[in-house]
Amino acid sequence: MGPLLDGPFAGREPRMVLIPMGKLGSVAWHAARSGGTYAIERATISYAPSARMLCRAAATQARIDGPVLIVGDPDTGGAAPDLPAAREEARIVYRRFFPQARYLGRAGGAPAGPASGPPGGAGSAAEVEAWLADDSETGGVLHLACHGEVRDDQASLLLHGGERLSADRLAGATRNGRRPGLVVLAACRSAVSGRGWDEAFSLAATFLSAGAGSVVAAQWSLPDRATSDVMVLFHEHIAAGRPPADALRRAQLALLDRPVTDWAGLIHFGR
């Protein structure tokens, strides 16, 4: 990153999009460090699976205002550990920023909204698919605070009952459905491909190819509490009117005194 930041962009604070290929896609380039400074301190850095997908996202008119779905730590039936901080994260995002949202997930994490009571569903794969397939409204926000995994050549979200919502299933649900303006995948390895190093088969790429404007996803397994802190700060900046790439950067800059693994795993794709 040094020659890039010290060369054509010296003396400026650029906005750049990186399209890393193969194993380079596993590197957190925004966390590159030289002379005591992280690359993220000198530039706003986004990522893209391909130049074509970047152009498609740039041309997308998806709006953040609109329907909102929040999924908070659904009960996986023992298939994975509980995520108490993710549940708290989902509750805060609901109460503070999207009180009109539909909330799915564990009853213990159910926020008291305009209509008090349990969540609008358990957080099953079918519920998420149905929301994505509804083409009656466009735009909006999807925030998933849950487990993500890559195995058997598939990147998947782990939802209620331990059911896996794979990238292939998501592609089917989103093909002619809703196109959220912002998709937040606060789920481990949601930016990682399930098919070797082919960048086109990650969960993040699936949403971008379906017309999402911006996607925030994870390059590695995320620490529960630290991820929750980043996500709350991120939504504070979104609520203040900042674009997703800027909002994520500002949230991460506020946590640079923590270990890199606490903040650098989340990356931005798209607009």
Image (tube, helix red, strand yellow):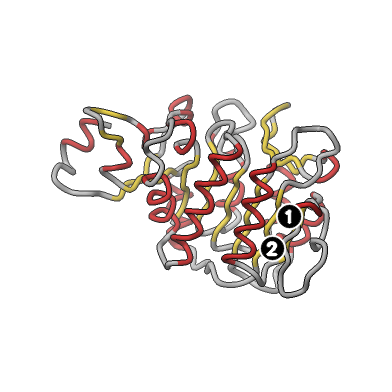
Label 1, label 2: how many angstroms apart (C-alpha)? 7 Å
Q: Residues within 10 Å of mark 2 (few under 14, many from 20)?
A: many
Dot 2 corresponds to which residue? Answer: 177
Taking the image as shown, residue 252 lies to the left or right of residue 160, namely left
Mark sitting on residue 267: none
Badge 2 amino acid = Gly
Q: Is 89 left or right of 60, judged from the image as shown?
A: right
Q: Position of residue 51 (x, y in %)?
A: 42, 46
Residue 157 % position (x, y)? 71, 41
Q: Are marks 1 and 2 in contact (CB under 8 Å)?
A: yes
Which of 129 and 79 lies nearest the eye of the viewer?
79
Residue bearing the label numbered 1: 173
Report the residue at 62% width, 51% height from top. 89
- Front residue of 228/54: it is 228
Q: How far across and down, in percent of the image, does residue 49 sit?
A: 48, 41
Nearer to the camera, 78 or 207: 78
Q: Left or right? Give the position of 156 relative to 49.
A: right
Q: Which quadrant would the C terminus be assigned to in this image?
A: bottom left
- Rendered location of residue 75, percent (x, y): 81, 44
Question: From this viewpoint, which residue is outermost toward the left?
Answer: 11
Kind of element beneath mark 1: helix
> In the picture shown, does residue 112 fall above or below 192?
below
Amino acid type of disc 1?
A: Ala
Q: Secondary structure at mark 2?
A: loop
